[in-house]
Image (tube, rainbow, N blue to C red):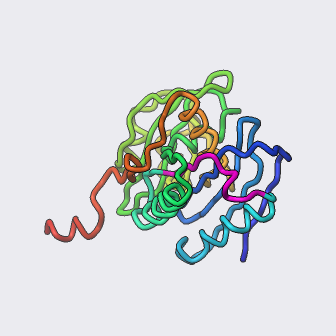
Amino acid sequence: MPGHLKKENNSNSLTLLAVDTATSTCSVALADQNGTIAELNYSGKQTHAKHLATMVDRLLEQAAVTLDRVAAFAVDAGPGTFTGLRIGMAAVKGLAAATRKPAVGVSSLDALANQVTHVSGQICCLLDARRGEVYAARYAVSDGEVTKLTSEAVVAPQLAVAPIDGPCFYIGSGAMVYRDIIADQAGKNARFAEGDENHIRAASIARLALRKLAAGDPGRTVELVPNYIRRSDAEYNKMR
């Protein structure tokens, strides 16, 4: 199966397995307090349901880790595609229930912002929400620390850019799709993430999840729900 496995250390103290299926890419990672142990990323046209389980098995096998050594789980809780979020959520809930381990959800936009802590100043995270809209939130980065400045919303890209004053770094699938619109509106103040920087990484989900657990989040599976932000297409059609 296509994909890329990245091993970053040989820690024997496995803490967490993270899953991201919120967008067209799929990512799984193993991490502990020392950092990312291994990560596997996939980008293709197949639904994530067809390859997620295989990716998890392959990740564990190549990292030489058994499932009973996983202390907790994490999942991208959205916003993102409705089908993708449901696939990842069901998988992580199933693993957590089977092993009786905690599981926590992490915002996809928070994950994106924490992937570019080398950037200084404002960051606008945008995910393509289709129908000419984006899921958006704005952040500030100073000395590698990320602060969330706005709540998450689904808006037209022009409205996401309008309140931003001064230089801003745009990242995510929404920034890729609407780059021309953003550049036209923001002018020289717009900087853009390039290539794979725009894809959510499970390693980022894992880092934020570990912080939540360390801060006292109990990781109750029953409280783990997707953050859709807006109604599904089916719900919109019923309202017509």
Q: Position of residue 46 (x, y in %)?
A: 56, 77
Residue 154: percent from the left, percent from the top?
35, 49
Residue 66 is inside the magenta segment: yes
* Vertical position of residue 224 compared to residue 97: above or below: above
Between residue 231 and residue 129, name the one nearer to us. Answer: 231
Q: Does 89 sit above or below residue 193?
A: below
Q: Position of residue 148 (x, y in %)?
A: 48, 30
Comparing 113 with 193, the one in front is 113
Asked if residue 220 is among those painted magenta in the image, a careful observer would answer: no
Q: Residue furthest top?
A: 143
Outermost residue, right side: 10
> Which stretch did the figure color magenta?
65-76
How many marks are shown on the rendered structure?
0
Q: Quadrant of the C terminus?
A: bottom left
Task: Looking at this view, name the residue that lies furthest to the left.
Answer: 240
Residue at (54, 39) in percent of width and height: 187
Is 82 situated left or right of 240 in this image? right
Give the side of residue 192 with respect to residue 160, left or right: right
Q: Nearer the viewer, residue 204 or 178?
A: 204
On screen, residue 99 versus residue 130, left or right, reads right
Choose between 36 and 118: the one closer to the eye.
36
Residue 144 drawn at (x, y percent):
67, 27
> Which residue is at a point 53% across and 26% down the rendered structure image?
147
Q: Eyeballing the image, is 144 above or below 80? A: above
Which quadrant: the N terminus? bottom right
Q: Residue at x 71, y 60 (%)?
A: 40
